[in-house]
Image: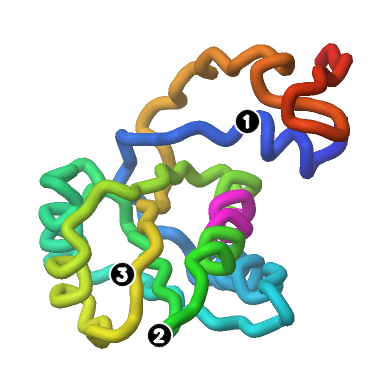
Amino acid sequence: MNATLETMWNRRSVRKYRSDPIPEEHLNLILEAARRAPTGSNRQNWRLIVVTDPDIRKRTAKACNGQMWMADAPVILCMVVLPGESKVNGTIVLDHAILAATSLGYGTCWIGAYDRTQVKQELGIPADHDTVCLTPVGLPAEQPAARRRKEPQELFSRDRFDAPLDYTP
C-alpha cells in the first residue's frame, strides 16, 4: 500500500490530545495542503482560521456544544466559505488539511455540531460568511481503534443506484 492510502486508512477521530505545540514547519505543510486542494472552477472561495490562542480555543470549544476536549489541542482550524458560496469546496479543503495532519502524525476530529452564531462571534467571522466545520489538530494522547465500516454492498452500486457492484476489499 502506498503512503497516501495508508494515511487515509489510518485517520481516526481523536478526542484526547497532548499539549505539545505544532512546529511552524508542520503547520505550514498542513496549510499548504489546504491551499493546494481543488475547488470548483478553481474558485478558492474559502478562508481557514488557525486558532492558537488558548483563551480563544477554550471559547471556541465551548461554542462547539461544550466539547472542551478540543481546547487541549494546540490548534483548532475553522473552515469558512465566502458569501453565497458552496460548503462543498470548504469541506474538500479541510479534508486535505486533515489528511496532511494525519500524515505528519497529528490527530484531528471533524466537528460539525456547534453554535454557528457563537463561533462566528468568537472568531470575528463576518455575518454574511458561512462556517463549514472545525477540527482540532494536535498529537494524540491515545490512538483510537478502528471502527466498523459498512459492507461494500451498502455503499456502492454500478451504473444505477439499485444495481449492485461486485467489490471485495
- Pick the front one: 100 or 96: 96
Between marks 2 and 3, how big is the CA–CA gap?
21 Å
Whole-percent x, y for residue 27 in the image: 51, 66
> Badge 3 is on which residue?
51
User: Within 10 angstroms of label 2, few (less than 14), some, or many (20 or more) residues?
Assistant: few
Helix, strand, or loop for circle 3? strand
Residue beneath disc 2: 83
Residue at screen point 56% across, 71% down: 31
Query: Which mark is first along the chain, 1 or 3?
Result: 1
In the image, which residues are magenta?
94-100
Residue drawn at (54%, 13%) of the image: 148
Residue 26 is one of the magenta-drawn residues: no
* Residue nearest the observer in this picture, 134 or 164: 164
Which one is in front in this view, the residue at disc 2 or the one at disc 1?
Answer: 2
Q: Position of residue 118 (x, y in %)?
A: 13, 67
Label 1 sits on residue: 10
What separation in Å lies between label 3 and label 1 (alpha carbons)?
A: 25 Å
Kindly identify the residue that appears in the image at 16 percent across and 69 percent down. 117
User: Amino acid under label 3?
Assistant: Val
Disc number placed over residue 107 in the picture, else none = none
